Image (cartoon, rainbow, N blue to C red):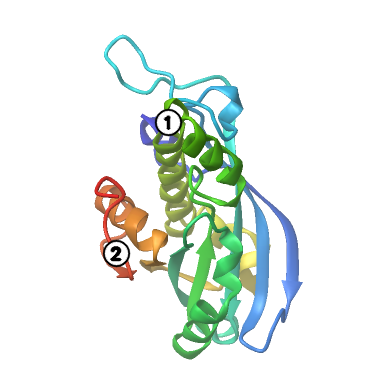
């Protein structure tokens, strides 16, 4: 449903911060927000539930779901467009894990631009709701409900990377008027929870076919 609304367009996004040379591995760090259709109550906040229609399918709500993003461009991308990867964070973590050691050296060594957003539903913002679910299991369905909105957010992030009218068209992702991104190659790299949820994300993605799933442990349905 979300992609039928999007069509061939790029998701709506805004760049809010650009940092040049944030560390010895990255040439530029770009931060911002992007929008997806909303399918949850309470504006998509932690604890919100999917709104279902008469057929039991998620029903689009008024407004949109806003997600943060962060992207790190390697030094080589200033002259050679970088391959692209989405990074998936660990248990109840956040998108800022993409700035850590696991991704930044890989990015620099192999000219890969890494981007990330949160796994809404099981991200840092959801810790309070997860604790509430441990105390009262009737709260638990809100976690997988919001996780589906989080998977959708990662799918839209992938489209922002692949669509030439997305990130590649924004000045923050360009050097000397040329895109720093190679739109032909997009991958996924997730660890721990990022591997568990990354399997589901990769299975339904329309924009990538290759993923690295590290330390996946077991699926959440078995846990």
In the picture of the structure, the residue carrying the numbered disc 2 is 217
In the rendered image, the quadrant that contains the N terminus is top left
The 10 Å Cα crowd at callout 2, few under 14, some 14 to 19, many 20 or more, is few
Disc 2 or 1, which lies upstream in sequence? 1
Please tell me which residue is depicted at 41% across the width and 20% down the height of the picture: 59
Against 11, residue 195 (above or below) is: below
Looking at the picture, how far across and down is residue 141, in whole percent? Answer: 40, 30
80 and 203: which one is in front? 203
The 10 Å Cα crowd at callout 1, few under 14, some 14 to 19, many 20 or more, is few
Give the farthest residue toward the top: 54
Looking at the picture, how far across and down is residue 58, in whole percent? Answer: 37, 23
- The mark closer to the camera, 2 or 1, is 1
Quadrant of res 100: bottom right
Give the farthest residue toward the front: 135
Residue 23 can be seen, yes or no: yes
Looking at the picture, how far across and down is residue 47, in whole percent? Answer: 54, 30
Against 120, residue 116 (above or below) is: below
In the picture of the structure, the residue carrying the numbered disc 1 is 137
What is the distance, in whole Å, between disc 2 and disc 1 at their CAs? 23 Å
Against 136, residue 94 (above or below) is: below
State the mark number for residue 4: none
138 and 209: which one is in front? 138
- Disc 2 is placed on an element classified as loop
- Disc 1 is placed on an element classified as helix
Please tell me which residue is depicted at 54% across the width and 50% down the height of the picture: 123
Quadrant of res 83: bottom left
Residue 81 can be seen, yes or no: no
Residue 43 shown left or right of residue 59 in the figure: right
Against 40, residue 110 (above or below) is: below
Residue 15 shown left or right of residue 195 in the figure: right
Please tell me which residue is depicted at 67% across the width and 75% down the height of the picture: 28
Looking at the picture, how far across and down is residue 183, in whole percent? Answer: 42, 65
């Amino acid at each position: 449903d979300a992609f039928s609304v999007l069509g061939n367009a790029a998701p709506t996004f805004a760049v809010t911060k650009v940092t040049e040379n944030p560390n010895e591995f990255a040439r530029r760090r770009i931060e911002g927000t992007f929008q997806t259709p909303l399918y949850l109550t309470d504006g998509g906040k932690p604890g919100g539930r999917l709104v279902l229609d008469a057929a039991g399918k998620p029903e689009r709500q008024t407004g949109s779901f806003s997600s943060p993003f962060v992207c790190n461009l390697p030094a080589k991308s200033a002259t050679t467009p970088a391959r692209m990867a989405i990074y998936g964070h660990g248990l109840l973590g956040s998108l800022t894990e993409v700035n850590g050691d696991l991704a930044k050296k890989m990015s620099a060594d192999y000219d890969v631009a890494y981007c990330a957003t949160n796994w809404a539903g099981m991200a840092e913002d959801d810790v309070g709701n997860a604790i509430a679910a441990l105390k009262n299991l009737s709260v638990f369905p809100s976690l997988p409900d919001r996780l589906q909105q989080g998977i959708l957010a990662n799918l839209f992030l992938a489209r922002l990377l692949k669509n030439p009218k997305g990130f590649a068209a924004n000045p923050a992702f360009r050097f000397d008027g040329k895109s720093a991104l190679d739109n032909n190659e997009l991958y996924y790299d997730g660890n721990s929870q990022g591997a568990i949820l990354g399997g589901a994300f990769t299975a339904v993605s329309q924009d990538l076919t290759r993923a690295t799933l590290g330390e996946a442990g077991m699926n959440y349905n078995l846990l």
